[in-house]
Image (spheres, helix red, strand yellow):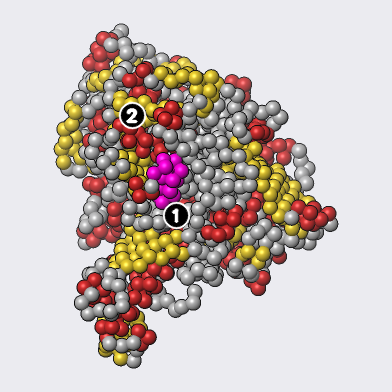
């Protein structure tokens, strides 16, 4: 942040510009689109987790009403379509082929084995239900444990032992050494269970092929239409990028699961080409459960070495990550570079070593879900630090405080590759403790001990690396793409401005926040500015929105483009005012001669002249638009402290989240309303994992929670109001100083709520650890068993 | 078979299959796409509309069951130039992010305020148990409903004065 | 999200409905449709023909008949919730959500006999009577004989549950529920009612293949003894991933004690 801001809009809690269409029901989501002559696709999905496809009788449905065509894996092969590629490669990664329609083998329940195209959706669904498919069921594996067992059935013959990769980070020898002298070794074996992202808008895609020019148009529910264009054009369909236009219109939430290239998008494109009509597919929720990439699913054993006075000495981690049946776009990166590198947390840990094994199973693919690797790392480190505090009979807040990296130690090189550029962790901890009245909560907890209701306080201090990402760095680590962002600013002759970004808003409020940045830079009313995004036909390049990157990377690209605009406007102003460019200042909404404030030109005057070019500098191009590409120098490192308060009904084991406070530092807030909203939603998702949600499979690979009847989503009465505070430590390396806030709530809250439950159970009954989710029976049984074996070794 | 019903004050007659769900009728036959489909087990509430003044899940009703009914969808509640207090409340309090659950949330909340003009936080949270939101953590949704309740009470008091 | 195709018929009176059912044994009665349509959308149910009885006015509404309330089977949960009936308004507040309550009906729910539904426990504790009409005329079934198994009530093919009769002279009642975090159905629900003669009837739902009376609890309370534990045998209960039979048996004890305490 090298310059002074006028800050008329930046930092203001403006209500959102995009909202009028959403609150009046006039948003435009993919399933709302209708194209002339449009027909419908219904997927035929494997009911088996693992099976040979021995026959598909397309004749069985060809005479049903409305049926136009049945597609099978053979059609995909005949069309010469490539496998859906993995976007992040690790050394020696085994990547099984991922065809758009399975040809010989289905590898998870929900894998697509055929597709029916029909005139109406109802007819397509009728025929899909009636299509005769013969299977030979094969033995399946659903868990990392089953998949790694001796003699386990192979998910893919070309992935021996079901191991896609072995990966490690840190210094094993130094870590072994650190453990040797440690007074305490805190050990935990835990499971970070699987989740379904569940954006409320199910995925949908609509494709139209125009034979005359060989052009494809794809409307799809994507967080990153440019990535879809790249993958589909260059890797799957082998067509030039300019023959495919991808539009992500209004998208009803993503949370990571709408990043990836999916089979259905390939299918509707192929189908449209084959039958010559637009083809739409919209997921039913029960399809989403077996086809949207899922999240988390780690089995981990870890050990923390601590001194008797609570100094962290070393940390070692062994994680088995369940990747599911295929590797989708970011799958290999999530449990490695987005997880292993975050295991240092906010602490000075002299030695860390982590091993991760990527395991294929006959389950829905696992990839990035809000936080992606970082919630898993945060949960692990914050859980085990709490266990250490309990064992040492120290207050968890104090143990954390004494291990924090100090403000004068930045940039801080961790033992797991990252260099933290800035941070000041203690003020956030203090503010959170004050906000939630931490000391009083501890008193209340003591008073409630032994009662029908007991209290738990979960405190966590966290950090995340986001703002993906420095291209050269991620390239070294295996990313198959750059991670910069681009922006285009177009000033019209009337002085109205269009901003274009490669970022994509699916709820994050870009259409308000980006104009806030621009209005300050251009010194014009925000009403004169509009943001355009989500269309590869209008914005040439970009990488989309995930990894909390929009503000830090996309916003920075915008800032650079805006600076190009104002620089050019100064040149034009200098010409019009017959002054030297160096004498022009941009102040109070006008361009004027320093020292002669009455000699000025308005934004409109200059915008008009840029287009008229009547009275214009001889060496300057007409027009007023600029494109900028911004590649960050480092990740950004938001941090904070969150405190969760739970009450447990000891008769039933029911856990109620009674209160929640978060203090976040994401640098300067562009729009506090939007930033806090991101935290609220993130916290609810994280508490969902801790208390409610679980995508459990049976041993045969059947999803046991495949509808909202079994998969418990957080509802309005499951969450309290969230108290929010923030500290501001700007990022030192991007032009806005901003960091990310999209994932922080989720990264922090799972660990905070889990620690709150375990804090209650530890103080009540000396229970050291239980795995999430803390369902009522699990908690009741643990309390019953622990009380049954009294006297307990409770520390207090 | 023929079905005739009134939506947002306009009467429509259409020939539909009996299996056509009311939500598909509204979205596809009438082109009113503000009413959304978020699940297939009648839980998420994105499809909430008013039928003869009561909030219902239009995914759990056949169009033929609504024969003769008077239906209001989000498009009939207010317009950008003339917003319903709930629409204003959701806007002012940032009660939406992706916007997908929003029409259902607003229609469900409208029923709450009809019966309970000054609801407590608990009443609002309990009333919205049939509407899922994945973005907001419900925090600002509850505030939006409170905002609207305040505005509507203020307006009715002003009318009484 | 389309159900399989079916024929659609409507009845405007009980006589009309019974005649249609007599004529076409394939007809499946649809009341509010809030159990049937979700199953049809997932194609778990594919009835060839529906008989819509929503329009039968004589099956709607709540009236007083001496020391009984008479509730039309097609009365919605929302109307039950806002009524002066004993216990049922409290129970209706636990059914579904506000939108479901505006369409779902008390008779539809009771005839459906979902083992996790809330009403059956209340019906047993209140000792309600079910008025059922069929080709052979009208018969009355006591609550104790109404719930016969999982999704199996005393209402036979060709019959309609038209009304329920609820004693209006109860002294006090309570319903305690532990709900499933996803479906919000009852993992266990316990209803208790103190009747006009001060005797207490109690029942539980959610835990077994159907709702049952809580005889041990009734005996203890009516014998002025403390509420015992071990009210039901886990061996008689169902268990699933969320709640084992043993846990449900425990919940019956916990909820029964809470409900009795509320009776005062």
Q: CA distance from mark 2 to mark 1?
A: 32 Å
Q: Is residue B154 left or right of residue A60?
A: left
Dominant secondary structure of the residues highlighted in magenta in the image = helix
Q: Mark 1: give few (<14), some (14-19) or many (20+) Cα within 10 Å.
A: many
Residue A411 is situated, as x and y percent measured from the top left of the image, at 63, 69
Please tell me which residue is depicted at 63% across the width and 60% down the height of the picture. Answer: A418
Give above or below for A332 relative to C125.
Answer: below
Question: For residue A503, which numbered disc appears in the image?
Answer: none
Q: Secondary structure at mark 2?
A: strand
Instruction: Give me the chain letter of mark 2.
Output: A
Q: Is residue C255 left or right of residue A211?
A: right
Q: Residue at label 1?
A: A543
Q: Is residue A401 left or right of residue C8?
A: right
Closest to the observer, B16 or B157: B16
Q: Residue at label 2?
A: A117
Give above or below for A593 relative to A400.
Answer: below
Residue A48 visible from this viewpoint: no
Instruction: Give me the chain letter of mark 1.
Output: A
Residue A217 is situated, as x and y percent measured from the top left of the image, at 32, 44
* Mark count: 2
Asked if the residue at tag 1 contacts the one at tag 2, i.e. Cβ–Cβ closer than 8 Å, the answer is no
Closest to the observer, C187 or A672: A672
Q: Secondary structure at mark 1?
A: loop
Where does the magenta region start and end?
A: A224-239
Please tell me which residue is depicted at 57% across the width and 59% down the height of the picture. Answer: A473
Please tell me which residue is depicted at 30% across the width and 24% down the height of the picture. Answer: A67
Residue B75 visible from this viewpoint: yes
Residue A531 is situated, as x and y percent measured from the top left of the image, at 33, 60
């Amino acid at each position: 942040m090298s310059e002074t801001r006028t800050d008329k809009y930046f930092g203001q809690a403006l209500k959102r510009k995009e909202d009028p269409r959403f609150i009046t029901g006039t948003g435009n989501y993919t399933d709302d689109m209708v194209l002339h002559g449009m027909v419908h696709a219904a997927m035929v999905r494997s009911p088996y987790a693992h099976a040979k496809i021995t026959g598909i009788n397309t004749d069985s449905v060809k005479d049903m009403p409305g049926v136009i065509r049945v597609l099978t894996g053979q059609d995909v092969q005949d069309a010469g379509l490539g496998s859906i590629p993995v976007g992040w490669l690790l050394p020696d990664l085994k990547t099984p082929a991922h065809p758009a329609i399975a040809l010989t083998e289905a590898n998870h329940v929900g894998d697509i084995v055929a597709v029916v195209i029909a005139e109406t959706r109802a007819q397509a669904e009728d025929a899909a239900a009636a299509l005769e498919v013969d299977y030979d069921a094969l033995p399946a594996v659903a868990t990392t444990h089953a998949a790694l067992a001796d003699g386990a059935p192979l998910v893919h013959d070309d992935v021996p032992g079901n191991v896609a990769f072995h990966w490690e980070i840190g210094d094993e020898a130094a870590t072994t050494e650190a453990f040797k002298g440690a007074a305490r070794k805190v050990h935990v074996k835990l499971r970070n269970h699987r989740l379904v992202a569940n954006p409320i808008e199910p995925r949908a895609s609509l494709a139209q092929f125009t034979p005359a020019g060989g052009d494809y148009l794809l409307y799809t529910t994507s967080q990153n239409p440019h990535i879809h264009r790249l993958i589909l054009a260059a890797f799957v369909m082998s067509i030039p990028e300019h023959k495919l236009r991808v539009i992500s219109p209004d998208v009803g939430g993503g949370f990571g699961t709408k990043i990836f290239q999916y089979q259905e998008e390939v299918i509707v494109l192929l189908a449209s080409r084959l039958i010559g009509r637009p083809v739409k597919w919209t997921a039913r929720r029960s399809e989403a459960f077996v086809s949207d990439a899922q999240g988390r699913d780690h089995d981990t054993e870890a050990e923390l070495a601590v001194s008797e006075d609570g100094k962290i000495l070393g940390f070692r981690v062994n994680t088995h990550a369940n990747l599911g049946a295929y590797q989708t776009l970011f799958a290999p990166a999530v449990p490695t570079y987005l997880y292993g590198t975050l295991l240092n947390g906010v602490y000075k840990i002299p030695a860390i070593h982590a091993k991760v094994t990527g395991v294929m199973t006959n389950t829905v693919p696992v990839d990035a879900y809000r936080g992606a690797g970082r919630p898993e790392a945060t949960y692990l480190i914050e859980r085990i630090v709490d266990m250490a505090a309990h064992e040492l009979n120290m207050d968890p807040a104090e143990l954390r405080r004494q291990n924090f990296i100090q403000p004068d130690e930045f940039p801080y090189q961790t033992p797991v590759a990252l260099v933290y550029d800035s941070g000041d962790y203690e003020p956030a901890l203090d503010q959170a403790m004050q906000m939630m009245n931490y000391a009083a909560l501890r008193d209340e907890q003591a008073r409630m001990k032994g009662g029908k209701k007991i209290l738990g306080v979960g405190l966590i201090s966290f950090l995340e690396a986001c703002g993906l990402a420095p291209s050269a760095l991620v390239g070294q680590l295996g990313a198959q793409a750059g991670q910069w962002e681009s922006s285009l600013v177009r000033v019209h002759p009337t002085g109205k401005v269009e901003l274009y970004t490669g970022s994509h808003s699916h709820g994050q409020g870009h259409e308000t926040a980006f104009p806030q940045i621009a209005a300050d830079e251009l010194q014009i009313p925000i009403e004169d500015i509009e943001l355009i995004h989500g269309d590869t036909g209008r914005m040439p390049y970009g990488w989309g929105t995930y990894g909390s990157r929009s503000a830090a990377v996309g916003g920075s690209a915008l800032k650079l483009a805006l600076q190009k605009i104002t620089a050019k406007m100064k040149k034009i102003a200098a010409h019009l005012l017959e002054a030297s460019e160096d004498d022009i200042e941009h102040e109070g909404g006008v361009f004027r001669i320093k020292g002669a404030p009455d000699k000025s030109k308005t934004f409109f005057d200059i915008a008009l002249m840029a287009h008229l070019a009547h009275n214009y500098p001889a060496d300057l191009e007409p027009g007023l638009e600029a494109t900028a590409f911004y590649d960050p120098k480092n990740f950004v490192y938001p941090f904070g402290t969150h405190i969760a308060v739970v009450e447990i009904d000891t008769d039933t084991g029911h856990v109620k989240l009674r209160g929640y406070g978060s203090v976040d530092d994401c640098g300067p807030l562009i729009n506090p309303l939007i930033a806090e909203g991101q935290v609220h939603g993130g916290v609810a998702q994280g508490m969902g994992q801790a208390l409610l949600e679980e995508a459990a499979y049976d041993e045969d690979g059947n999803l046991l929670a495949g509808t909202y009847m079994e998969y418990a989503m957080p509802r309005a009465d499951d969450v309290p109001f969230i108290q929010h505070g923030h500290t501001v430590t700007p990022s030192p390396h991007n032009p806005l100083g901003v960091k990310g806030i999209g994932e922080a709530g989720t990264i922090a809250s799972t660990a905070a709520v889990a620690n709150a439950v375990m804090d209650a159970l530890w103080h009540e009954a000396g229970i050291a650890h239980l795995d999430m989710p803390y369902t009522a029976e699990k908690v009741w049984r643990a309390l019953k068993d622990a009380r049954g074996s009294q006297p307990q070794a409770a520390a207090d | 078979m023929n079905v005739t019903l009134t939506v947002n004050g306009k009467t429509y007659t259409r020939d539909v299959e009996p299996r056509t769900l009311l939500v598909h009728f509204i979205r596809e036959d009438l082109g009113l796409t503000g009413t959304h489909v978020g699940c297939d087990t009648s839980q998420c509430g994105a499809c909430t509309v008013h039928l003869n003044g009561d909030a219902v899940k239009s995914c759990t009703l056949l169009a033929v069951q609504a024969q003769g009914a008077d239906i209001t969808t989000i498009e009939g509640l207010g317009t950008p130039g003339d917003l319903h207090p709930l629409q204003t409340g959701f806007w002012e309090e940032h009660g939406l992010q992706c916007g997908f659950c929003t029409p259902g949330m607003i229609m469900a909340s409208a029923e709450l305020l009809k019966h309970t003009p000054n609801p407590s936080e608990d009443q609002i949270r309990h009333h919205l148990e049939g509407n899922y939101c994945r973005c907001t953590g419900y925090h600002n949704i509850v505030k939006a409903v409170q905002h609207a309740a305040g505005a509507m009470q203020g307006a009715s008091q002003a009318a009484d004065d | 999200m389309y159900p399989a195709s079916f024929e659609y018929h409507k009845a405007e009176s009980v006589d009309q409905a019974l005649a249609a059912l007599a004529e076409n044994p394939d007809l499946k009665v649809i009341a509010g449709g809030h159990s049937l349509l979700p199953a049809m959308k997932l194609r778990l149910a594919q009835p060839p023909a529906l008989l819509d009885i929503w329009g039968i006015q004589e099956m709607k509404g709540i009236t007083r008949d001496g020391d009984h309330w008479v509730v039309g089977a097609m009365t919605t949960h929302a109307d039950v919730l806002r009524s002066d009936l004993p216990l049922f308004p409290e129970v209706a507040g636990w059914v579904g959500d506000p939108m479901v309550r505006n369409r779902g009906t008390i008779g539809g729910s009771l005839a459906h006999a979902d083992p996790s539904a809330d009403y059956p426990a209340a019906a047993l504790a209140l000792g309600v009577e079910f008025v059922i009409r069929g080709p052979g005329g009208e018969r009355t079934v006591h609550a104790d004989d109404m719930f016969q198994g999982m999704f199996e009530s005393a209402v036979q093919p060709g019959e309609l549950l038209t009304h329920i009769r609820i004693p209006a002279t109860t002294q006090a009642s309570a319903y305690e529920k532990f709900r499933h975090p996803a479906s919000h159905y009852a993992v266990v629900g316990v209803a208790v009612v103190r009747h006009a003669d001060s005797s207490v009837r109690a029942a539980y739902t959610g835990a077994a293949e159907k709702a049952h009376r809580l005889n041990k609890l009734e005996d203890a309370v009516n014998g002025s003894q403390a509420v015992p534990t071990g009210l039901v045998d886990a061996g008689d209960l169902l268990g699933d991933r969320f709640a084992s039979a043993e846990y449900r048996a425990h919940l019956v004890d916990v909820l029964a004690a809470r409900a009795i305490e509320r009776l005062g």
